[in-house]
Image (cartoon, helix red, strand yellow):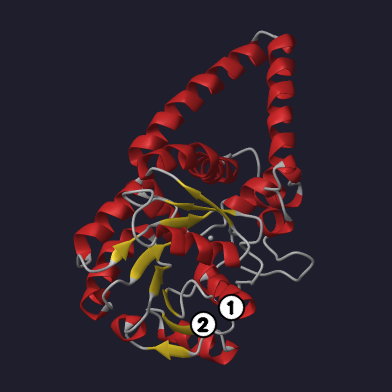
Amino acid sequence: MLPFARVSIIGMGLIGSSLARAIKACMPEVRLCVHDASAEVRARVSELGLADEVCDLPGTAVIDAELVVLCVPVGAMAAVAAEIAPDLAEGAVVSDVGSVKASVLAALEAALPVHVRVVPGHPVAGTERSGPDAGFATLFEGRWCILTPREADGPGVAQLAAFWERLGARVEVMDAQHHDRVLAVTSHLPHLIAYSIVGTASDLETVTRSEVIKYSAGGFRDFTRIAASDPVMWRDVFLNNREAVLETLGRFTEDLVALQRAIRWGDGETLEALFTRTRAIRRGIIDEGQDTAAEDFGRPHGGPGSAS
């Protein structure tokens, strides 16, 4: 039995288009209606055949939908939710895919009527690319999808968990604020560092821009890949998770100063101990299956380049 027979997706970038493809691949019986604010994107989605219906208005797309997934930047969640609110069916589950959850939970609960079920979600998957051509159906396979409802056993939670599991994801239910603290460490701070170090390298007067590009080693290539992510999306992430990010950034700054001190004083023992410990953590990430071509190289498994 299908978790949902009628699904609506609002926003057809990397995640939205990947979700549409995954639904078509794993649950072809689902009736899928989508909307994107860009007329150009809507036209491309129609050309690609990603949905049963591509609607010009978000409200039209959600009529009779049993599940509505908002795949828009975190800063746009409240406005989009308010726009679709009058057209939502009674008992519909409304979710999202944003990387910040506490502010989204509050925004959706404030904007949506009481007859819908708010179950925010975050599929921890993506690449640095964007747009409807960037998505691929296997993006969520083996990845965690974190659900952050107000109540862990609230209405719609089990149903939404079953939906993501059908797409190949592993599901975890978590408190929204705890999610934001965890993601500040595992995702938000790394992106902030990447944006910063690429900007630093570009600004150094003794190194030309062409040399930075020409002689980029593996580490810098990884940083530049992350720093190529959608600037609007990440602007909203940092503004909506500022407390957790600033707390984590403060701890990182202290650790960085300690590392700077070890280098200055030739403390090889401290450096080697740190590198040994962090290498073990990296191997744990690989063992957990959270390192694949999709995230490391921005393309689906074994496929050509493609576009969180």
- Tell me the element at label 1: loop
Report the Cα–Cα distance between label 1 and label 2.
6 Å
Tell me the kind of residue under disc 2.
Val
Question: At 41% from the left edge and 60% from the top edge, which residue is drawn?
Answer: 232
Q: In which quarter of the image is the N terminus?
A: bottom right
On the image, which quarter does residue 24 sit in? bottom right
Count neighbours of disc 1 (C-alpha within 10 A) and say few if under 14, some if 14 to 19, many if 20 or more: some
Q: Residues within 10 Å of mark 2 (few under 14, many from 20)?
A: some
Residue 186 in view of the camera: yes
Residue 103 pos. (x, y %): 30, 50
Relative to 266, residue 17 above or below = below
Q: Name the residue under label 1.
A: 27
Q: Quadrant of residue 190?
A: top right
Question: What residue is rendered at 58% in x and 39% in y?
Answer: 204
Horizontal side, residue 238 vs residue 144: left or right: left
Say which amino acid is labelled 1: Met
Residue under the point 43% across and 67% down: 71
- Residue at image mark 2: 30
Q: Which residue occupies the extreme right position in the image?
A: 302
Q: In this view, does 171 lie above or below 278?
A: below
Give the percent coordinates (x, y) of residue 147. 44, 53
Q: Is residue 133 visible?
A: no
Left or right placement of residue 260 versus residue 148 in this view? right
User: Considering depth in this image, is 298 or 104 the residue closer to the camera?
Assistant: 104
Q: Nearer the viewer, residue 65 or 276?
A: 65
Point out residue 89 in the picture as x, y percentages from the top left corner: 28, 78
